[in-house]
Image (cartoon, rainbow, N blue to C red):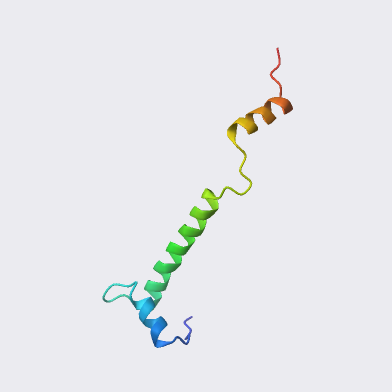
């Protein structure tokens, strides 16, 4: 299935600037999408939100699961 979307000439030109000669808009948009997904994943993996320093995590683990003698 294909669909038609309306774009301004400016946006069409911006999208086209990501492509190579002979690439369709579908191919260009797939490439842009793949890059966006990779960037989103990179930002998620590099986020410090919910970060616990390793030293703190080790102390917490030792409290929860002390070594048996």
Q: Residue furthest left?
A: 21
Please determine whether, in this image, residue 56 is positioned above or below residue 8.
above
Q: Residue at x 42, y 69 (%)?
A: 30
Query: Is residue 24 at all visible to an observer of this figure?
Result: no
Q: Residue at x 73, y 28 (%)?
A: 64
Residue 21: x percent and y percent? 26, 75
Q: Quadrant of residue 54?
A: top right
Q: Residue furthest right?
A: 64
Left or right for 21, reference 27: left
Please determine whether, in this image, residue 51 is positioned above or below residue 6.
above
Q: How many marks?
A: 0
Left or right for 24, reference 8: left
Left or right for 14, reference 49: left
Residue 5: x percent and y percent? 48, 85
Q: Quadrant of the C terminus?
A: top right
Residue 59: x percent and y percent? 66, 28
Please determine whether, in this image, residue 10 is positioned above or below residue 19.
below
Please determine whether, in this image, residue 28 is positioned above or below residue 35.
below
Q: Quadrant of residue 10?
A: bottom left
Q: Which sits in the foreground, 1 or 30?
A: 30
Q: Residue at x 27, y 76 (%)?
A: 22
């Amino acid at each position: 299935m294909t669909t038609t979307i309306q774009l301004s000439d400016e946006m069409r030109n911006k999208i086209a600037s990501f492509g190579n000669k002979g690439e369709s808009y579908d191919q260009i948009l797939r490439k842009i999408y793949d890059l966006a997904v990779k960037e989103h994943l990179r930002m998620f993996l590099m986020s410090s939100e919910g970060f616990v320093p390793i030293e703190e995590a080790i102390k917490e683990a030792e409290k929860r699961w002390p070594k048996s003698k």
